[in-house]
Image (cartoon, rainbow, N blue to C red):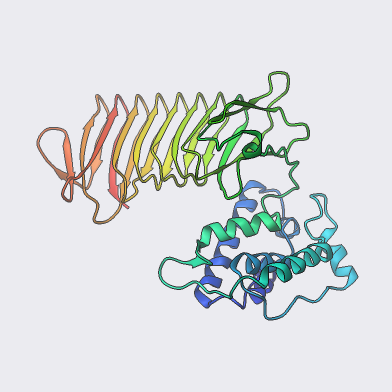
Amino acid sequence: MTRQEYIQRLGAGLSGFDAETRQDLLLEIEDHIDTLKASRPEASESEILACLENPENLARSLCLEAGIKPEERPEKPPENSVKAETRDDHGDFGAQSTATSEAGDEWEKDGRDRENKKSKGPRITIDGQDLDEVIRRALDIARMFGTKRKTEAQFDVQSAVAGKARKVSAAFRSADIQVKLSVDGIKVMSEKDGPGISLVNHDDQHVEIRSASSMEDPDTVELWIPADVDELKVVTSSGDIRIFDRVGDLLLQTASGTISIDCCSGNVTARTASGDIEAARCSENTILETASGDIQLEIDEQANSVKIVTASGDVSLRYPEDFDALITYATVSGEIDHDCMQTAGRSLKIGQGFVPIKIQTVSGDIKIRRA
């Protein structure tokens, strides 16, 4: 199956959505395919697609999440077609007959209590939820999270504590950490059998997830954190930290790893020794610090304040149109390149100058540009 064929079959199964939402769904799935290709440059297109859920099953999962009954149920494919989907070394993602049956049963149970709904308006929602959240849950149903089946080291933290955890801290040595937004409690997932992960419940409000002292770290650990966790702290020695989506405060620290933040609606503090920091869509107070790494920040229009500190690394700052900020900067030997209004001393003004931004380097260059 080619990429074009996969997207066409998926699109056909999404006929119950309006055209705009269907296009957004297909673009989101194509982005996921691109991410898989980037993570496995040695794999061919057919090998990447073979690791994904059957497009008809994925379409059904999306429809179930949106409360939309497909106009036509996918017919069961010929036996040789099913074998072609499941004949690979990455797991049984193509086992269509079981997945289709389960999805059908779920629809029959759920469909009696839900009305068909379509998203409308510039903010795309499905059944009252943002499009991104619907896609995330549907992909969870379809198990389309990677190029091989994960061994799920899942801890149901909410049932392990008397109340809801308000704080989660995670500490690992070499594992790369990925943080994603959860809709059904705290989960820890890794791809390694017998993962070296332990969970400690300090009290009803604080849960700690960390490397097991007697075991090697997994290569990658996924942390699924719900929005009702007020504070998340992640610490690694050499592992990278990637934040896909976070609601609530965020504290990140690594020695030699890199930090990447795609989205956070809480306060952010991120520190590295030699690693780089990249951040975007941080809508509260943001503090980014590194000794020798570079820092890149795309400021969110809702940002409250920003502080950036680096010794020898360069700083790149991009701000949105119609943004208001007052920037103060200090650099010993670095250069400053900007498109802002220069004011008295080492300060720059954007718009009305409401949001305070402080940038400090020793030998690093500073570049400030409108996005």
Image location (x, y in percent) of residue 232: 50, 34
Relative to 49, 226 lies left or right: left
- Residue furthest out toward the bottom: 71
Residue 125 lies, with reference to residue 69, above or below; the image says above
Q: Which image quadrant is residue 99 in?
A: bottom right
Image location (x, y in percent) of residue 45: 70, 59
Q: Residue at position x 62%, y 33% from top?
A: 161
Q: Residue at position x 60%, y 61% from top?
A: 29
Q: Residue at position x 65%, y 38% from top?
A: 159
Count of labels shown? 0
Relative to 219, 324 lies left or right: left
Residue 52 lies, with reference to residue 8, above or below; the image says above
- Residue furthest out toward the front: 162
Is residue 214 visible in the rendered image? The answer is: yes
Residue 276 lies, with reference to residue 100, above or below; the image says above
- Residue furthest out toward the left: 344
Image location (x, y in percent) of residue 218: 69, 31
Relative to 165, 324 lies left or right: left
Is residue 1 visible in the rendered image? The answer is: no
Image location (x, y in percent) of residue 205: 53, 31
Quadrant of the snapshot with the N terminus: bottom right
- Residue furthest out toward the right: 79
Q: Front-most of 248 and 338? A: 248
Q: Which image quadrant is residue 358 in?
A: top left
Relative to 349, 319 lies left or right: right
Q: Residue at position x 32%, y 53% from top?
A: 371
Q: Which image quadrant is residue 86 in?
A: bottom right
Q: Front-most of 119 and 230? A: 230
